Image (cartoon, grey):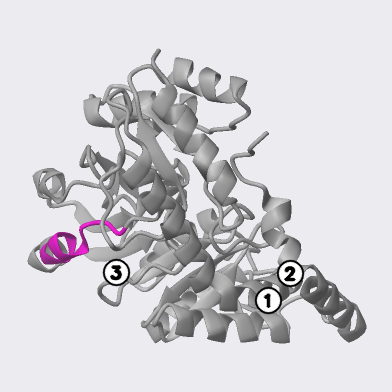
């Protein structure tokens, strides 16, 4: 069996360092917001080219807290519209809703799967105050075009980079991250962060994430409890120095898929150089048959994502929307095995089976 992602194998090289960090953690007896969180925030800020990093509980909270901070600062008001890709994981949209803002869904480019800048401008109204960009599957969205639109209409731009650790970003926008275990930089549990160059925003997010408090027992905002766990920060610090090398390995695997998969029933993604390949996603009109065929041959695949956000039961208010490109993508995509520990022989086998598929 070739698993879609063997997280245990991904983390195996770090076992000894993890054990050392755990021992230090237990010996210190400081379990929340200690030295490890502070050090990771400094290191991850530097890694992303940002002035500030605020560790939080998870990627969804990173989005929610960012928009709530902008509201507290007066940059946004409840009910403002935020443009967001229709083709994304639902967390991108939930973060907007949890902040009391209104998501406006825009169709993707069918080749890149990322939000289509042409569609953004068509959806702008007097209520539009921001854009949440998502670098889906690890590929940089068309930031030059998006930034031009943002400047033209004076819109806040926030980037959901939950799948884009190690990407070379363009512009100095605020970005949110998830360190869910399966990410390119994954913790051993839930974790997230926001990076920004805006000191006031960083201070506000940090306060909101800690009960709305900058000084213990004194609360300035109606806050949350969403702090990066001290132990998860320690584990992330172990893995962070190896992120670039692991992303290079992902790119090497992706390049093999792109150059060696030759089957006219399978559509390969259109990938730019700005891609860290959190996922490698193909499309086919007969997805169920292909997935079963691969499973029968011992190759596990996943669907990211089987149901478009606007079709989810929880999103009933959006069911009336007609988003044919998004729906087509969600009906056809299939994610192939992708991880820095995927062996060459297994890649050979995956490619061989994809090229032999005829159903």
In magenta stretch: residue 110:
no
- In the rendered image, which residue does mark 3 sit on? 75
- In the rendered image, which residue does mark 2 sit on? 14
The answer to whether residue 212 of the structure is visible from this angle is no
Question: Residue 257: percent from the left, percent from the top?
Answer: 40, 44
Which quadrant is the N terminus positioned in?
top right
Q: Residue at x 76, y 71 (%)?
A: 231
Question: Residue 313: percent from the left, percent from the top?
Answer: 48, 24
Please say if the residues under marks 1 and 2 sit with CB atoms less than 8 Å apart.
yes
Q: Nearer the viewer, mark 3 or mark 2?
A: 2
Q: Nearer the viewer, mark 1 or mark 2?
A: 2
Vertical order, 46 against 240 (above or below): below
Badge 2 local density, few (<14 within 10 Å), some, or many (20+)? some
Region in magenta: 140-148
Please say if the residues under marks 1 and 3 sit with CB atoms less than 8 Å apart.
no
Vertical order, 204 against 134 (above or below): below
């Amino acid at each position: 069996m070739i698993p879609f992602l063997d997280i245990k194998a991904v983390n195996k090289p770090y076992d000894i360092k993890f054990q050392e960090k755990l021992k230090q953690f237990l010996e210190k007896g400081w379990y929340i917001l200690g030295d490890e969180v502070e050090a990771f925030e400094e290191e991850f800020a530097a890694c992303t080219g940002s002035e500030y990093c605020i560790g939080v509980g998870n990627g969804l909270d990173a989005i929610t807290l960012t928009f709530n901070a902008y509201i507290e600062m007066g940059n946004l008001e409840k009910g403002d519209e935020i443009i967001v890709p229709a083709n994304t994981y639902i967390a991108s949209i939930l973060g907007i809703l949890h902040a009391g803002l209104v998501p406006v869904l825009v169709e993707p480019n069918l080749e890149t799967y990322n939000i289509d800048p042409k569609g953004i401008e068509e959806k702008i109204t007097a209520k539009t105050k921001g854009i949440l960009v998502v670098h889906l599957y690890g590929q940089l969205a068309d930031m030059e075009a998006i930034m031009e639109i943002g400047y033209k209409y004076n819109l806040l731009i926030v980037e959901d980079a939950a799948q884009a650790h190690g990407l070379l970003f363009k512009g100095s926008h605020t970005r949110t991250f998830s360190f869910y275990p399966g990410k390119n930089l994954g913790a051993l549990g839930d974790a997230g962060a926001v990076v920004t160059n805006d000191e006031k925003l960083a201070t506000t997010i940090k306060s909101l994430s800690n009960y709305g408090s900058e000084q213990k027992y004194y609360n300035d905002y109606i806050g949350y409890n969403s702090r990066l766990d001290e132990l998860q920060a320690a584990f992330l610090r172990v893995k962070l120095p190896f992120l670039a090398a692991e992303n290079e390995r992902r790119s090497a695997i992706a390049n093999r898929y792109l150059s060696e998969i030759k089957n006219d029933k399978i559509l390969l993604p259109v990938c730019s150089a700005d891609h860290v390949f959190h996922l490698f996603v193909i499309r086919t009109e007969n997805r169920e048959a292909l997935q079963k065929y691969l499973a029968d041959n011992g190759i596990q695949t996943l669907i990211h994502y089987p149901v478009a956000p606007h079709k989810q039961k929880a999103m009933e208010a959006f069911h009336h929307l007609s988003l044919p490109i998004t729906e087509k993508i969600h009906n056809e995509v299939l994610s192939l095995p992708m991880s820095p520990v995927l062996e060459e022989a297994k890649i050979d086998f995956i490619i061989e089976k994809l090229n032999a598929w005829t159903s």
